[in-house]
Amino acid sequence: MHVGSEQTERGIAALVGRMADSFSRLVTQHLQLARLELTEDVKSMGMNVAMIAAFVPFILVGYAFVCGALAAVLSQWLGWAGALGAVGLLNLVGGGGGIGWALYRLKARRMMDDTTDELSRSMAALTSAAPAPAGNTLQGAERPLFKESPNGR
């Protein structure tokens, strides 16, 4: 009769079941964190885009007046065609630089960085080697204190 082996099998099955439940809970929590973080990021970006859209008309009108005034000042030395060309070229250079800067910032932004960090920590914990058992050996000894026979008796 192997009463001990039956209890061991039930114990191992229970451990495997608890491990599977814990892993399932971990994955579920990671998905919930990702969903919450993505929702927060989208809300934040949406508010920023709405604010930009609200102020764009004021900027465009003011910008048109400043460009007209600059062209009027420059027309005394360059003529109207030269002044309009110079203001237009200045706008192209400034706009290109602004778009380049915005693209750089967009590429630098890390989306869902908390979720990525948590997933990395979980993967590191799951893939790291388990510590060696401390029992069944004497300190400093290289061989086990109790040796099992090959047939388990």
Image (tube, rainbow, N blue to C red):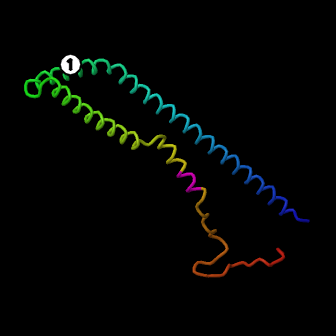
- Asked whether 9 or 72 is in front, the reply is 72
**Left or right: 89, with 131 as reference point:** left
* Quadrant location of the N terminus in the rendered image: bottom right
Image quadrant of residue 57? top left
Furthest residue to the left?
Answer: 76
Q: Where 85 sits versus 147, above or below?
A: above
Task: Pinpoint residue 27: horizontal percent, then vertical percent.
Answer: 63, 44
- Asked whether 51 or 101 is in front, the reply is 101
Amino acid beneath label 1: Phe
Q: Which residue is mark 1?
A: 65
Residue, x 44% and y 26% (percent of image)? 46
Task: Pinpoint residue 108: horizontal percent, then vertical percent.
Answer: 39, 44
* Quadrant location of the C terminus in the rendered image: bottom right
126 falls in the magenta region: no
**Left or right: 140, with 46 as reference point:** right
**Left or right: 29, with 80 as reference point:** right
Residue stretch in magenta: 120-125
123 falls in the magenta region: yes
Q: Where 80 sits versus 144, above or below?
A: above
Secondary structure under the numbered disc 1 in the rendered image: helix
- Asked whether 124 or 12 is in front, the reply is 124
Residue, x 47% and y 43% (percent of image)? 113
Residue, x 85% and y 59% (percent of image)? 6
Image quadrant of residue 11? bottom right
Task: Pinpoint residue 50: horizontal percent, then vertical percent.
Answer: 40, 22
Residue, x 80% and y 79% (percent of image)? 149
- Asked whether 79 or 119 is in front, the reply is 79
Mark 1: give few (<14), some (14-19) or many (20+) Cα within 10 Å.
few
Furthest residue to the right?
Answer: 1
Task: Assign the magenta stretch its main secondary structure.
Answer: helix
